[in-house]
Amino acid sequence: MKEKISKKTVWLTFLFAVVLIVGVFSGKATVSALSPQAVLKIGKTNVTKETYSMQKGSRAVLKVSVKKWEGKKMKITYSSSDEKAVAVTAKGVVKAKKAGTAKVKATVSSGKKKVTAWTNIKVVEKESSKSGQTNSLVAYFSCTGTTKPLAEYAAEYLNADLYRIKPKTPYTEEDLDYNNSDSRAVKEQEDDRARPEISGSVEAMEDYDTVVLAYPIWWGQAPRIISTFLENYDFSGKTIVPFCTSHSSGIGSSDTDLHALVDDSVTWKKGKRFAAGTSKEEVVQWLEETGIKPLKAEENGQMGQAFNFKTKTVTLNSGYEMPLNGLGTYSLLDEECVNSVSEALKRGVRLIDTAYMYENEKEVGEAVRNSGIPREEIFVTTKLYPSQYDHPKKAIDNALKRLDTGYIDLLLLHHPGKNDVKAYKAMEKAVKEGKVRSIGLSNWYIEELEEFLPQVTITPALVQNEIHPYYQESEVISYVHSLGIVMEGWYPFGGRGYTAELLGDKVISAIAEAHGKSSAQVILRWNLQKGVVVIPGSSNPDHIQENTEIYDFELTEEEMEQINALNRDEKHDWY
């Protein structure tokens, strides 16, 4: 009997040891599995135990979750190892102050239990560029003009910066004579050590994560100047997406032959050959297939989207495109509202702004449905009022019924109020259910946003506030943009009782005269160039038309500064 018990004990001990060893080596020990894990996110990106890059001067919101403690009351505190480089507020708002790296730690406690999570925040410098700041670069070499338009298509789709690789000594027609064995191009291609010099350089290459590299095919290979470009910079950790253009040749090994010129840590996407005259749609389709997508603010939690003045749209962090100019319908009622919206749609306006408190959602919906324009081409914004925050689901469903447009493009909370977080969470649910495409806030400022954002899951796509030359809110605009949120302004002409003074301002009138435009058009253009979507209201068809004609001129930096100097911090409404 003793002997049997002894064998059984040994056998059980052996099995227990095996379980422990397997658990340790697999990283799935039972003790570890039972421990609650805190997760840090910025936007949709899990940054736990990772290094996350931010531009100097930008802000991002940290969100912390502990799955095993969902529904429980939690206390969260934040700390930074270097407050001079990276500061973090009690609400989890990270501020990139100067170049450097700091460890940001979140400590979460529930009752007597406590867990921590950390991330490294790297602050980098970056020059601003006319095309907008992005983490993608399209670099191209083009002699005959075949490659250039395709590179521009890629840059436009990706919201990327565009860089032309220019030879220090330009290629002449004789240099490109393929039939002459003594021509410059032929000799360079025959010498794999040839490195033609490049004129100029890419500023802050270290800030780009993805580089799209475009070139023509020369004798089955990339021109040697592409080798010069690749050897001139450190591409460590980046993704390179090559494509070539040619009249008949395929891409061959021209893309894979370039791999040896950069660090092994570079991720190369499979190259693609395009014929001359390839359409933008084909280029975009290929980029989508490679998995390279336009930079979306919510994905990196900090950067705003650049306005596209060609398409007159901006891509929200939800992925949907929104027009840059629209029609505000405040104070428009009954037939006047129907007629005004109808006139706006006839004149090319595709953004209509309404609200529960405007009491005209039904009329807006009627004009949209009867316009003859496909629903997906019209962008409808409406808002919930604080009196509805107690029963937000009912309020959302009622808005859908009144509009009767199938879905709501953008739903905002009209301004802060009791239960605004509860209402926003209902809007988040409506997004998942397909009732609403994008959500945001109206009349939220920096302090309110810092309090509100850590409490919600979906980063607002847009913030809509009062903005005009006498109340410019430049700090708020910069803050909102730094979070990857689009800014929209109401009362662009100052609001009732103030419009005549603003439109008659001597500075604005002089700028308008210089451009052959109206003061109203100058003010709207000033907003757009500051990165602010505009929704002027009007029932006058001529004024509605006038407010759309703002894309055929551009204010100079000096003119922008002149209007910026008019700021009085003079708010014209109580919101």
Image (cartoon, rainbow, N blue to C red):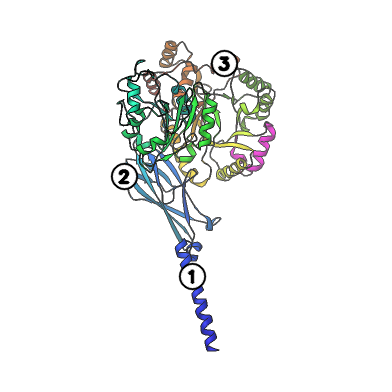
Above or below — where is 526 with respect to 126? above
Q: Amino acid at mark 1?
A: Val
Q: Position of residue 169 (x, y in %)?
A: 30, 20
Residue at mark 3 to residue at mark 1: CA–CA distance: 78 Å
Dot 3 or dot 2, earlier in sequence: 2
Closer to the camera in the image, 399 or 69? 69
Within the magenta stretch, is there residue 4?
no
- Kindly identify which residue carries mark 2: 84
Within the magenta stretch, is there residue 389?
yes
Residue that lies at the very extreme toward the bottom in this rendered image: 1
Q: Quadrant of residue 397?
A: top right
Find numbered disc 3 in the image and state the secondary structure of the residue it sits on.
helix
Q: Is residue 468 visible?
A: no
Question: Residue at left 40%, top 21%?
Answer: 563
Q: Point out the stretch of residues depicted in magenta.
A: 381-405
Above or below — where is 406 with respect to 70? above
The N terminus - image quarter: bottom right
Residue at mark 1 to residue at mark 2: CA–CA distance: 49 Å
Question: Residue at left 68%, top 29%?
Answer: 362
Q: Amino acid at mark 2?
A: Lys
- Kindly identify which residue carries mark 3: 545
- Kindly identify which residue carries mark 1: 18
Closer to the camera in the image, 561 or 168? 168
Find numbered disc 2 in the image and state the secondary structure of the residue it sits on.
loop
> Which mark is drawn over residue 474?
none
Residue at mark 3 to residue at mark 2: CA–CA distance: 50 Å
Above or below — where is 16 with respect to 97? below
Pointer 1: residues within 10 angstroms few (<14), some, or many (20+)?
A: few
Q: Is residue 288 visible?
A: yes
